[in-house]
Image (cartoon, rainbow, N blue to C red):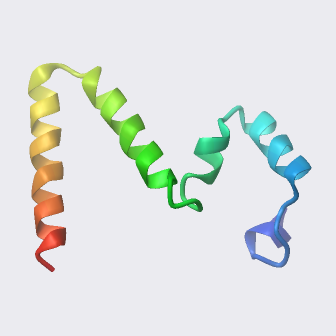
Amino acid sequence: MSDMERGKYPPNLVTLVQLIDEFGITPNELLQDVVKAGYSIKACWLAEIISELPPEEQERILELVEFMVTKAKNK
């Protein structure tokens, strides 16, 4: 496992499936930081959990995210 983490060799499909099963996560969750599409998946997941919050909290979080996005675009 540590050899994979250090990038000595890539995991094979069987190892990936074992990791997914062991941690009880989805393939998307496992690969979200590796695959470019992971950012879209994470954004959808965040939108889903934000939508479950009270409206006041949703507004507060969305204002913060909008501010951060605007700031990032102006770099």
Query: Viewed as shown, does residue 72 lie left or right of 37?
Result: left
Query: Viewed as shown, does residue 13 lie left or right of 40?
Result: right
Name the residue at 90% across, 48% down: 14
Quadrant in the picture for residue 5: bottom right
* Closer to us: 54 or 72: 72
Q: Locate the N terminus by quadrant.
A: bottom right
Quadrant in the picture for residue 67: bottom left
Give the answer, above or below, for where 54 lies relative to 14. Answer: above
Q: Locate the C terminus by quadrant.
A: bottom left
Name the residue at 46% across, 44% down: 41
Give the answer, above or below, for where 33 lies relative to 42. Answer: below
Query: Viewed as shown, does residue 38 lie left or right of 58?
Result: right
Name the residue at 9% across, 25% down: 56
Q: Position of residue 32 (x, y in %)?
A: 55, 52
Q: Position of residue 70 (x, y in %)?
A: 11, 63
* Closer to us: 56 or 30: 30
Name the residue at 41% across, 36% down: 45
Q: Position of residue 10 (x, y in %)?
A: 82, 68
